[in-house]
Amino acid sequence: MLRDFHISFQVKNAYTVNQFIYGLQRLPLIGKFIPSTFYKIKFFKLLSFLITFIREVIKIFGYKLLYIAVFLILPLSLFKSNSSELFMHIYLFLAIIGAFANTEIFNPTKDKYYMIVLMKMNARNHAISNFLYFLGSIFVGQLVSMLILAHNLVPWYFILLLCLITIMLKFIAINIYFYRMKIKDEVINENKPKSWTLYFGLIILFWGLAYGLPYFNIIIPEYVFLIISVIIIILGLISIKSVFTYPNYANLYKKLLNQNNIFVSSEDVQKNTLIESNLKRISVDTSIASNKEGFAYFHDLFVKRHRKILSDSAKKTTLGILLVGIVLLFVIFLVPEAKSPINNFIMNYLPFILLLMYFINTGKVVTNAMFMNCDHSMLSYRFFRQPKTLLSLFRERLKTLIVLNIIPAFTMSLVISILLALSGGASYITYIVVFLSIIAMSIFFSVHNLILYYLLQPYNIGMEMKSATYTIASLVTYWLCYYISDLKVSSLTFGIIMILFAIIYSLVSLFLVYRYAPKTFKLR
Amino acid sequence: MKLVIKNLKKSFEKKEVLKDINFDFSSGKIYGLLGRNGAGKTTLFNCLNEDLDIDAGEFYIVDDKPRKIESKDIGYMLSTPVVPEFLTGREFLKFFIDINKENIPDLKSIDEYFDLIKIDADDRDKLMKDYSHGMKNKMQMLVHIIASPSILLLDEPLTSFDVVVAEEMKELLKKLKKGHILIFSTHIMELALDLCDEIVVINNGVLESIDKNNLNNEKFKEKIIHVLKGEENA
C-alpha cells in the first residue's frame, strides 16, 4: 500500500511539473522561449516536488489556520467570549458538516482518475492509502493550528479530543454513505449532491446549531460534550473496520470516476459547450429569407438568424435607458431640489457616459458570434479571404454594428437632452455637442470593436482566444474608459474632443483595416 | 499545367518538418500523398494554401510560362468539414455562386449541384447546423467542385463518408481530374492505390514519387511500405 501511495505521489508530481511547463509555454512573450525539451529536464522534477510540497504545507497548515481563525476565533471574539465550551460547541457542528461534505473517498479527482482508471491501480489500495494520508494531514493540521491559535482558550487535551472526533466523524460519514449506496443503489459524489436544496438546507441547519444556539445562550455543557465524544468515538471505531474492508471500491470508482465528474472544465467539454451555446443562438425560424445578393445576402441572413443577440439586446438596452429616463423625469417633477444636481451631472460628467457606452456596446458579443458561427468555418475557404471579399463583408458588418448600437445611443442622447432642458437648460451649443458626442462614442466603440477583431483576429481553429495583443488591447480600452470617466472636465470641452477623436480614430482605423486586414484576418 | 515546388522548407521550433521539397505535379492526375503520422502532409498543404509562411523555397504554376498562384487557383478541403452553420445548404450555394460567378466554368442550377452530390430535396433547405458530418463534408466538397480550382488539396477527404457515398465521391473526383491537379492525402493505402494515378511519399521532410514499374499491387504496396519506413536504400 505504501508503494501504491508512492507511485501515485510520483505521478502527481510528474503532471504538476508538466502543467507548470505547459502553463509557462502559453505565457505571452516568455512562452516562445520555453522549448518542449524542458519536459525532460530533471531540475523541473525537483521544482515540482517543491511546488507539491509547498502546496501540501499550505493545504495542511495554511487552510486549517485560516479555518480555525475565521470560523472559530473570530465568532468567539464577536460573542465576546473565551469559553472553551463555546469553542467546542461550534467546532463539533462544523466538524459534522465537514465530515459529510469532505470525505476524500467520495471525491472524484483527476488523481484518482489517472491512477485507478487509466493506470489500473488497485482501487482499494489507492483509496485507502490516500485516505490515510488525508486523515493524517487533517489530524496534524488541525492539531497544530488549534495549538497555535486556541491554546489559551481550550486545554490541550480537549484540542486532542477535537482532532480525534474529527477523524472519527469522517469514518462515520463514510459508513453512512456506504449504507445509503447499498440501500438506494446509487453512487455518492460529494461534489454533486442529489439535492442541492437538502445539501444547503443541512449546512444552514448545522451552522444555525453552531452559531445560532450560542446566540440564545444555549451551549453544549462540557459533560454533555464528553458523552457525545464517547459516542462518536465508539461509532467511529465500529466504522473504521468497514471502511478498510469495504469490498466494492473498484465498482464505486468505476461509476464515480466518469469523465463528467472529473473534467468539468476540460478544454474539450468547454469547447463543446461553447459550440453548442453558439449554435443555439441561431434562429431556426424557417420564414427567414433574404432577397439581397452576394455578401449583402450572406450578411443579411447572418443578422436575421442572430436576431436574439443582435437586435434584441439593443432593444433591451434602449428600453432600459428609456426607463431610467422616465424615472429621472419623475424625479425632476416631484423633487425640484434634484434639478440642480441632475443638471450639474450632465454638464460635467459626460466622461462618465463614455464608460457607460463602453458597457452597452454590443461589438464584442457580436464579433464573438461572427467568429464562432461564421468566420470560424468560412475562413478556411480561400475565396472568403480574398481582399475584395473580406472588405466588402467588413463594410456590411460595420454598417450593421453601427446601426445596432446607434439606436440605444440615440435614445440616450435624446433622454439626456430632455433631462438637461427640464433640469435647468444649457447653452444651445452644449445641447448639440452632448447629443453628437454620445452618438460619436457609440460609433467609436462599434468601429473599435470591429477593427480589433479584424486586425488582431484573436481566435484559433479550436475557438480558443489566442492573442495576447487582443487581450491587452481590450484591457487598455477598458482602463482608458475607466480613467477618463473620472476626469473633471466640462461636458462641452469633453464632447468636442470626443467627436473629433471619434472621427479621426474611425478614419485611421478604416485605413488600417483596408491596408492590413487581408493579411491579419485569418485563423490562428 | 504544372504545379512546381522548389526547395520548399518549413520548420517548427527546431524541428525541420519539410526539409527540401522538390516536385512537379501535372494536371489530369490524382496524386496520392502518403506519409506516416507527423510526416508533414498537413504542413505541406498549409504551406501550399498559404496558411503558413514558408521558410525557404518557392512554388508556382507553369501554364505556358511560370506564374504566381492566385487564390482562385487553389482549393483546400479540410478533413473536418467546415460550413457556415447558420445557412441552409441552398443559401450557402447561392452565396458561393453569387460571389464566384465570374470564375465558375459552365454554371449549373443549384438543384443540379445538389443532385450531383446526392443531397435529398428535403435536406436542401435545412440549416446546415442540423446536417450530419457526412453531409457537411459533401457540401464542402461540392463548393470546391463548383469553384473548380486548378489545384485541389484534399486532406483525408473520404474518411467520414459511408461506403456508398465514398464510392460516389471517388467517381466524382475521377471525373474532376481532367484539367486539374488533385493532391489527396490519406492513411489508407488501398484508397490511394485505387483512386490515385501516382503515389507520392513524404518521408524525412522530402517528397518522392514511387514508381509502379509493372509491379503488381502487392509488390507495389510492399515497396511503398519500405519507403515509408525509410528502408528504401537498405
Image (spheres, rainbow, N blue to C red):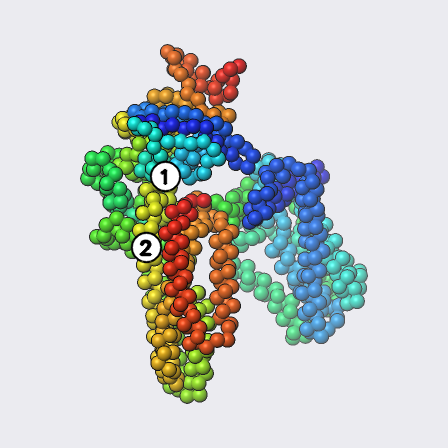
Q: Classify 10 Å Cα crowding around label 2: few (below 14), some (14-19), many (20 and above).
A: some
User: Vertical placement of A468 versus B23: above or below?
Assistant: below
Cα separation between marks 2 and 1: 28 Å
Q: Residue at x 63, y 71 (%)?
A: A212
Q: Residue at x 67, y 44 (%)?
A: A48
Q: Between residue A71 and residue B129, name the one nearer to us.
A: B129
| Badge number at residue B211 | none
Q: Residue furthest top?
A: B214
Q: Which residue is mark 2?
A: A395
Task: Estimate the x, y position of residue A61 in percent, counting from the top left.
Answer: 72, 56
Task: Estimate the x, y position of residue A318 in percent, counting from the top left.
Answer: 35, 69
User: Vertical placement of A208 versus A376: above or below?
Assistant: below
- Residue A320 visible in the displayed image: no
Q: Which residue is mark 1?
A: B81
Question: Which callout, 2 or 1, points to the residue nearer the camera?
Answer: 2
Q: Quadrant of residue A306?
A: bottom left
Q: Between residue B140 and residue A188, name the one nearer to us.
A: B140
Parent chain of label 2: A
User: Vertical placement of A195 versus A355: above or below?
Assistant: above
